[in-house]
Image: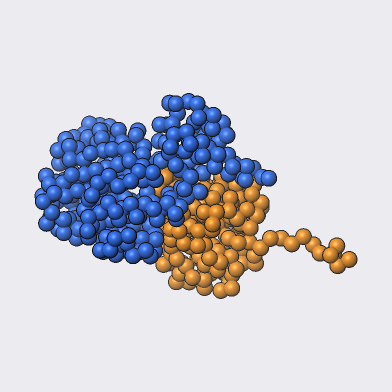
Chain colours: A orange, B blue
Amino acid sequence: MAKLLTLPKKPAIEAVAIGCSAGGLEALRKILNALPATFPAAVIIVAHTAPDGENLLSSLLAKTCQLPVSEAYEREPVLPGQVYVAPPNYHLLIEPNRCFALSVDERVCFVRPAVDVLFYSAADVYRDRLLGVILTGANSDGAQGLKAIKAAGGITLVQDPGEAYADTMPKTAIATGAVDKVLSLAALAIEISEQ
Amino acid sequence: MDDTSIQAIEISLFLEALYQRHGYDFRNYAKASIKRRVLTLAAIHGQTVADLIPRILHDDGFVTEAIAQLSVPVSEMFRDPIVFKTLRETILPLLQTYPRINIWQAGCATGEEIYSLAIILEEEGLLERAQIYATDINDIALRKAEDGIFPVRYLPEYERNYKNAGGKTKLSDYYVANTEFMRLHERLRRKIVFAHHNLVSDGVFCEVQLILCRNVLIYFNNDLQKKVLELFHKSLVRHGFLCLGTRESKRAVEERQLFAAINRNCMIFQKKGGEL
């Protein structure tokens, strides 16, 4: 009898993929700062940044986040409880063996790294164990990728365009009709940290 | 079975057909990127991946275009200027002792980087003694590289990169331009031999002091990457140099004791003494 009463368990999230552009640093800080040191999933970030130089974003985020933050290194495994940032001027992808891959293929939506590229490949690998998030940005990148995450059974969240520094990215994502929840940054932070 | 899994089968069958029919082996490419490229090729032709299979088998003209799309060349002049600056300041002085300097760029795409290197060689007084081989599997890209003609719209970026790479004069000393295109000078072009070479299936074809292979191995799986690193080891003279892309895996290059790092940020390595 006990067996019949068991509810189907929601699969645990293996990875959180986040895309953002203009105004992204502050938004990312708010979300990452809310994640507990025991957060069980990997967090993978694509932010549109200047193409050259060092990965400033990862060092800025590392200052306030409880989880370890680093650039995503080619061929290295995606580990739980770790925050990764795509290197400037490379697309970031996830291989089926759950390792990072980089590419210098053409820009997508005028940008490299592109959120779409990460989201498509992550959706293929993590399927329903992926949470996709679109934050502030003045670009349409990420919308198609978010749709792919939804189609693969993953969860899709978007920052409320009303409070976003730039509302194009959230609005374009919402317009795909593939978004589970539209939330304020504060609510997003809670929603993600409760996974 | 869901659509994604079925598509994975289609892609693998297409790559198998391409290999068995034409000998081009993309089966050991990293999966996520090659999937994107195959899907792009299918989308350009308004077809599914499965529809590409009969075409690659029966339409002889299709293979060149397919290869061009599957090996999308993206390159720029003096990409990562610090690398070219380091090559200029650290590596070229070491090559000066050779009466003849052989250089190989594997995966030259449309040639922007090899012309950048030729410019540095000229500024350091080494171009006359240099023989440069630039190879790729993409014949369409190779033809563009051989022409040395590039759109001028990227010039501001190239000028900036050239300065940051320690450029000694003006980039405009090396090309002629109209409103749309720039063409690199003949004196640079004649020092470079552009040739078809497939890293996956072709062996050693020259012995060189420096190999440039930037952002090519990132598309290969671990086994293929390992094999190509061995090919580079065999193609280098004793103590020869290897320059890879700045974000490529350091671990993969160093773990097998074939190369020692000269400058890890710029991904410049030196062949270690021992044979394989």
Q: Is residue A18 left or right of residue B177?
A: right
Q: Position of residue A4 (x, y in %)?
A: 85, 62
Q: Position of residue B274 (x, y in %)?
A: 28, 63
Residues A145 and B126: in front is B126
On-image quarter of the C terminus of chain B: bottom left
Q: Position of residue B216 (x, y in %)?
A: 37, 49
Residues B215 and A133: in front is B215
Tally the marks.
Answer: 0
- Residue A110 visible, this angle: no
Q: Position of residue B235 (x, y in %)?
A: 27, 51
Q: Is residue B238 left or right of residue A74?
A: left
At x 43% / y 49%, what residue is drawn?
Answer: B219
The residue sitting at the right extreme is: A1
The residue sitting at the front extreme is: B275
Q: Is residue A28 left or right of residue A183?
A: left
Q: From this view, report whether residue A75 is shown above or below residue B135.
A: below
On-image quarter of the N terminus of chain B: top right
- Residue B13 visible, this angle: yes
Q: From this view, report whether residue B214 is shown above or below residue B17.
A: below
At x 47% / y 33%, what residue is drawn?
Answer: B21
At x 30% / y 34%, what residue is drawn?
Answer: B144
At x 52% / y 62%, what residue is drawn?
Answer: A78
Q: Is residue B123 left or right of residue A143?
A: left
